[in-house]
Image: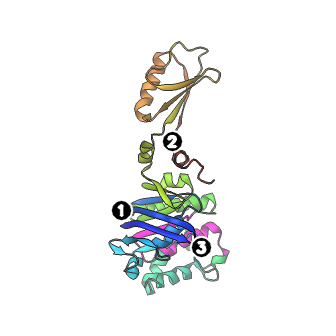
Amino acid sequence: MLEVSHISKKFRQLVAVDDISFSIKAGEFYGLLGPNGAGKTTTINMISAILAPESGTISVDGKNVYGETSAVKKKMGIVPQEIALYDEMTALDNLLFWGSLYQVKGNAAKERADYLLGWVGLEDRKKEFIKTYSGGMKRRINIACALMHDPALIIMDEPTVGVDPQSRNKIFELLTELHQQGKTLLYTTHYMEEAERLCDRIGIIDKGSIIAEGTLDELKSRNKLEETIVISYTNDELNGMLKGFTYNHDAEKKEILITTTKLKQDLPEIVKQCTDAGIAIQNIDIRSVNLETIFLHLTGRQLRD
């Protein structure tokens, strides 16, 4: 659905995007993850035909974004990081206005707007001015506006920034439903938990370059990061210990810490060996490798540093 090939962009001496390439299949939920200033929004703006790259090509469904821009834009719905709504207009009028830009008019536009207002949970407030809405409500209307022309590719640039937990969960529900409907989604965020929860594949961008890409399991495997199993026990003394595993024993805390790259395979054997050795297990805690661990491993810094 989307092909990005070797795109770059500079602002004076600042290299904002440096030779980025990635592709997204139809129906895939792809997350572009990175800290503020990593190049996410610049990349989104180039894909959205807002900002032309200095080199490289971008195509949507086989059409060049900068050669067949009008046709491409009909296939894309853009949810920008900044709220793109008119405060002095009602929610309904905002949707009708954005729909008209894509030639969605008349009864078809009103029916589509009513459906989307119900879908985002704001039908009962559709005739109220946007200026009366909370930040989370505005975010939901922002998403609805991008969907008025029923695009196949939906591009979202940090759509949950500054929203309350209730609105964030509602947005997650909406995104999950779009994914289930077969829409293709490109989603930028600097929240690790969002990418882990929502995305099929993830590209990690830092300092204008994609430094890793794949599913969460692929990223874990490629970087050979170990997960930790923490066994807490109640014995005063241990008569036997584990064989064939790398571990540390903290007698004072009564904990055994085992590191593994094969958690699902190793855990049953570890429990069996503990039982055979007479270790009275009180608790098993899994300290899993997550995106935060991977990002720290790749860059040497926390995501929000």
Indicate which disc, 2 or 1, sits on the residue closer to the N terminus. Answer: 1
Residue type at tag 3:
Ile
Disc 1 crowd, CA 10 A, few/some/many (<14, 14-19, 20+): few
**Relative to 170, is 132 on the left or the right?**
right
Which residue is disc 1 drawn over? 25
User: Which residue extends farthest right?
Assistant: 132
Toward which corner of the image does residue 248 lie, by quadrant? top right
Q: Residue at x 47, y 72 (%)?
A: 46
User: Which residue extends farthest top?
Assistant: 239
Residue type at tag 1:
Lys
Element on which disc 2 rests: loop
What is the distance, in whole Å, between disc 2 and disc 1 at their CAs? 26 Å
Q: Which residues are magenta?
A: 132-159
The reply to whether discs 2 and 3 touch (Cβ–Cβ < 8 Å) is no
Disc 2 crowd, CA 10 A, few/some/many (<14, 14-19, 20+): some
What is the distance, in whole Å, between disc 2 and disc 3 at their CAs? 34 Å
What is the distance, in whole Å, between disc 3 and disc 1 at their CAs? 28 Å
In this view, the residue in front, 207 or 156, is: 207
Q: Position of residue 15 (x, y in %)?
A: 54, 66
Query: Label for residue 289?
Result: 2
Toward which corner of the image does residue 67 lie, by quadrant? bottom left
User: Which residue extends farthest bottom?
Assistant: 106
Toward which corner of the image does residue 87 lie, by quadrant? bottom right
Residue type at tag 2:
Val
Query: Label for residue 83?
Result: 3
The image shows residue 87, relative to residue 197, as above or below, that is below
Indicate which disc, 2 or 3, sits on the residue closer to the N terminus. Answer: 3
Disc 3 crowd, CA 10 A, few/some/many (<14, 14-19, 20+): some
Residue 227 visible to an observer of this rendering: yes
